[in-house]
Every structure is written in C-alpha cells, then in structure tokens.
Image (cartoon, rainbow, N blue to C red):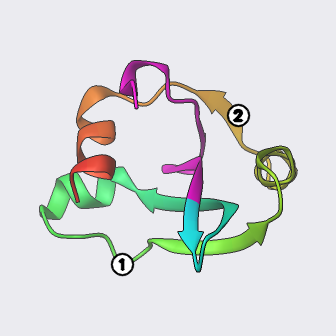
C-alpha cells in the first residue's frame, strides 16, 4: 500500500482509517482508531486501539467515520509509520 495516499480521518487527537481484514476467506471493511499523540508521548502501544464497528463495505465504514464527526486528513509520516509498522 502506498502510504502517501492513505486517507485518514481525525478527531480529538485520534486517527481513523478504513481497513480490510480477511477472516475465513471473507473480507470486511472496518474502522479502527488510535491516539498517535499518546503513543509518541509515552513510546508504548496506545491502549485506545479499538474497532468501533465492522461494516460490509468501505463506503459504510467511511459513512460511520463521518457520522462520528471526523474530518478528512492526511496523517503525518511518523503516524503512518507507527500504524503500519506495528
């Protein structure tokens, strides 16, 4: 994945992004979130990493993210590096 083109949503210091997970041969779009600033401050895995919902399509996942009041944003490189480097 080209991390330079990953679209994130952010609100209150949290970054949200669409993700596809394969389970038993099935793929579902999910929205996950993590507090990047908290991780950078303490240099430990954030405890706020959660899956608020599982959706049948990316569109449904993004609709849910927008409904939570997120604004489209491009995450800083260090944030993306941590998200995909875990």
**Circle 1 — which element?**
loop
Magenta range: 1-20
Query: Along the polypeptide, which appears first: circle 1 or circle 2?
Result: 1
In this rendering, the answer to whether 3 lies above or below 29 is above
Q: Is residue 27 left or right of residue 6?
A: right
Circle 2 residue: 71
**Circle 2 — which element?**
strand
| Residue occupying the point 33% across, 38% down | 80
How far separated are the C-alphas under marks 1 and 2?
23 Å
On residue 56, the disc is: none
Residue 46: % across, % down: 31, 70
Q: Residues within 10 Å of mark 1 (few under 14, many from 20)?
A: few
* Furthest-left residue in this view: 43
Circle 1 residue: 47
Please report contact status of discs 1 and 2: CB closer than 8 Å, yes or no.
no
| Residue occupying the point 82% across, 53% down | 57
Residue 24: % across, % down: 59, 80
In this rendering, the answer to whether 58 lies above or below 23 is above
Quadrant of residue 45 within the rendered picture: bottom left
Residue 84: % across, % down: 30, 48
In this rendering, the answer to whether 46 lies above or below 40 is below
């Amino acid at each position: 994945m080209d991390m330079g083109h990953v679209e994130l949503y952010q609100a209150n210091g949290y970054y949200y992004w669409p993700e596809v997970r394969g389970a038993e041969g099935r793929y579902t779009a999910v929205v996950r979130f993590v507090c990047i600033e908290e991780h950078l401050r303490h240099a430990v895995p954030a405890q706020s990493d959660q899956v608020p919902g599982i959706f049948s399509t990316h569109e449904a996942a993004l609709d849910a993210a927008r409904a939570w009041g997120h604004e489209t944003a491009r995450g800083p490189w260090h944030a993306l590096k941590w998200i995909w480097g875990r």
